[in-house]
Amino acid sequence: MLPVIVFAAVVFLIQGILSAMQMKNLSNEYLALRRKGKVAFGRKSGGFHAGAIVMFRIDDEGIVQEAKVLEGVSVLARVKPLEGFQGRYVGELTEEDGPRNHRNLRKAIADAALTYRKYTAGELVDAPPSPAQKMGMALTSVGRNLRQKRIERT
């Protein structure tokens, strides 16, 4: 039993270290883009599929100057250049502008465009719900459904 616990602890520690390294890479790439100008940021979590984060460095008119992406299911994924967006207006990007076989990357691109449009309109940009908030919403929904079924039976 003790070897299993030790193994789980070591794996958990390694995963934490690799995760921190990935976040450091993302942070460094973001800061490098931010030093050059404004950055539009889009994200879509993946769950069991590859999640995606896109960063578009834009000029004062919202024209993409540089694009980068962090995409993958593992903590080994690193930020890479994203081609095909230079010279385009970030506010008009849609899911169709992304690669056909990368659903979450397409959604992250659309999220960056939406975030930019909200920011330029002066609207509040909402942060995505945390995993704990998602769990709370799911439990609330289950409780509501159970109460509804109980009411329907009476």
Image (cartoon, rainbow, N blue to C red):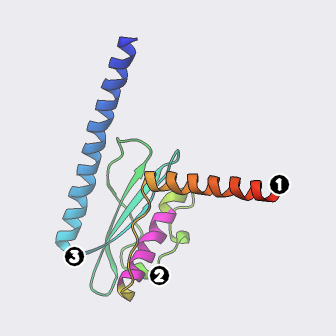
Under tag 1, what secondary structure? helix
Report which residue position mark 1 lands on: 153
**Residue numbers of the magenta segment:** 106-119
Is residue 116 inside the magenta stretch? yes
- Depth check, front residue: 115 or 65: 115
Residue type at tag 1: Arg
Q: Nearer the viewer, mark 3 or mark 1?
A: 1
Given the current orientation, which residue lies at the most extreme right position?
153
Q: Nearer the viewer, mark 1 or mark 2?
A: 1
Q: Is residue 62 above or below residue 134?
A: below
- Closer to the chain start, of discs 1 and 2, is 2
Quadrant (top left/top right/bottom left/bottom right) for the C terminus: bottom right
Residue at 75% over, 54% down: 150
Using the rendered view, name the quadrant where residue 62 is placed.
bottom left
Given the current orientation, which residue lies at the most extreme front position?
154
Report which residue position mark 2 lands on: 92
Q: Is residue 81 visible?
A: yes
Q: Residues within 10 Å of mark 1 (few under 14, many from 20)?
A: few
Report which residue position mark 3 lands on: 37
Q: Residues within 10 Å of mark 3 (few under 14, many from 20)?
A: some
Under tag 2, what secondary structure? helix
